[in-house]
Structure formats: C-alpha cells, structure tokens
Amino acid sequence: MPLLTSCYAAPRWLRGGHVQTILPVLLPRRLPRWDKAERLELEDGDFLELRWMQAQNREARPLAILSHGLEGSVDAIYIRSMAGSLMRAGWDVLAWNYRGCGGIENRLRRFYHSGETGDLHLLIEHASKSYARIALIGFSLGANVSLKCVGEVAAHASVQAVVGISGPVDLASSAKAIDLKPGNRVYQQRFLQSLKDKVIRKSKRYPELHEMLAGSDGIQGVSSLKEFDERITAKLHGFADAEDYWARASSLPHLPQIRVPTLLLNARNDPLLTEASFPEELASSSEYVHLEAPSHGGHVGFHDFRAGLQPWSERRVLEFLRDVVPHSHGAP
C-alpha cells in the first residue's frame, strides 16, 4: 500500500504554500555547471537541447533524466540543484529543454505541451545506449510528462524508477486553479507572458500563426491559461479544444498502468494543485505508485534548512532511489 506518511516538517515560519513556492527563487545558491552540451537531432527535422553531468569514471553509474516545469529550462534552480545532489550520490545526470525552451527557438511550428511524451521516449532510447539503469525525475509539468511516459505504454527496460515532484496529474483542475484562485495571479501572469512572447517570436517565421491570434486584441488579449490553451496549444498540437487537451495530456488516467517504482511527492498546500492531484485511492491499491503528501512544501519548495540550502525533497528523492534502484547509492 504505497500511500506514504511523510517525515517532512517545515519550519513554523515557512508553512505557507506561496512562501515555500517563491523562496527558492530568492535564495542565493552556488549551483553546479553542466559538463557537456549536446544537440539531439530528431527525425521530424527538429532538435532537443541536452545538458550532461557525468563522472570521469562512470562505469556502472546509473543515470537520472531531469524534466523541468512549464516555461522552465535546464538552468532552472531546482534542476541544477537536484543534478548536483544526484552527482554527489553516485548518479550521472541528463537534463533537457523542451522544444522552444531555454531561450532557443525550435525549428517547427509546434513546440511542447504538458502531455508531450514522444520526445522523452526518444531521449530515453538515446540515453539507454550508454546506461542500463535510468530514473526519470520530473518537476511540475515535467512530473506529469514523466509519469504519463511510463503509464501510457510499458516503460523502457532501462527505466527503473520515476519521481514526480509537485505534479499536476490532473491538468484541467490545475489550470483552473491557476486561472481562478486570486492568490495565483502572479504565477498565471508570469506563465502567460512567457508563452505569449514565444508565440509572437514564432509567428514571425510562421505567418499562419496569425490566424490563431485573430481578433483586434491578438495574443496580448489572452488573459487566462484556458484561453491560451484554447487558441494556441490545442490548435498547434492536434486537440479539439482546451478541455480535450487537458483530458488527453493528463497522466492521471495512466497511473494505474505504471509498472515501475514511482514516487509522486505533492504538498497539500501547493497553490497550483487541487485534490485531483492527490490520488490516494489509487496509491492505496497500487504496488508501484507511491503517493507522499506532506502538509507543507508549496510548489517545488520543500525547504527545511536542516542541510543548508539543499531542499528536503532532494534528500527524499535520493532515499527513494537508493531503496528501489539496484546498486544505486545516496544517503537521505
């Protein structure tokens, strides 16, 4: 019954969901640098930007593939911080930018979306040529993608564990929470402006995108994630509308089919999640899907300052991987 009781305890002054969410962005951190950059060319004419951290003697080391959140990149604080913790624990690390992320415009008219798993499948196949043991670790949107990847089809033989941190496994309810909860307006506006800027840049190369922005207000008139997904995401990626996109891109319906050890770590006070992203009944009956839902932690927060600025979530992930991946290392 992988419904876990969490040992995470936030400091009394750090128990607000918004504080935990915003604080990591403000903390001064010394983050590790990537060892190597790689551009993976794809058969459809596009590419993926990859970043590696690898030990000089990497024989028999497992690999963690890190997937970032909405409008994030390989240089997000939580990605590089987790990469450093994994390296110290005996793991090599591969992080990747989704199409059009990280300030690098992709070639095709389309870019990425919250349920796009095809690129992750290709990335796993690419990495498995050198690594027999792989763990997928996703943050926020990346958690949904990682979980859906191993639930929609049987996981690649090299994938031995999956971790989703602050995962909106039910996209419809999370999108509506971002749009409708007054306290979430700062996140909504930040996401929307980044997405709008991306579409504006892309429309210079693909004039037909202007048809999607029809109306006197154009793209700047889009005022909600639902409207953006209705007018842009759905049309670019073959969905009927926003509701169809959210339903088909969510990982929640695929969780029962997962057959590798999986940890979903979602805080109860995460301002971007709703009750639908805490599948307790499923976890209670699953042999593979572990749900851990501490009362506090915010969205990709989980700071406790008991190990300096290293978030508790990183120590928890290392502990989980140590327990489920054969011959892996890492202390909690």
Image: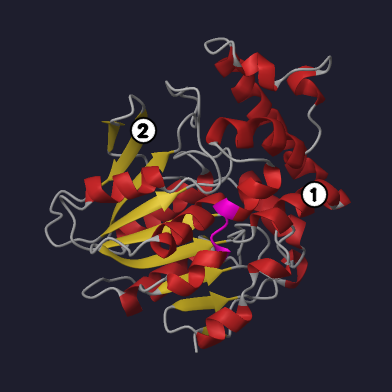
Measuring from the top left, give residue 201's x and y in whole percent: 58, 16
Give the residue furthest to the right.
Answer: 182
User: What stretch of residues is rendered in magenta?
Assistant: 248-252
Q: Is residue 225 above or below residue 181?
A: above
* Res. 6 visible in picture: no
* Marked residue nearer the N-terminal end (2 or 1): 2
SS state under label 1: helix
Residue denoted by label 2: 49
Q: Quadrant of residue 196?
A: top right
Measuring from the top left, give residue 213's x and y in whole percent: 71, 20
Q: Is residue 245 above or below residue 43?
A: below
Residue denoted by label 1: 184
Q: Is residue 324 above or below residue 122?
A: below
* Res. 209 visible in picture: yes
Measuring from the top left, give residue 11's x and y in whole percent: 69, 71
SS state under label 2: strand
Q: Residue at x 62, y 35 (%)?
A: 233
Question: Quadrant location of the C terminus?
Answer: bottom left
Amino acid bearing label 1:
Asn
Q: Nearer the viewer, residue 316 or 305?
A: 316
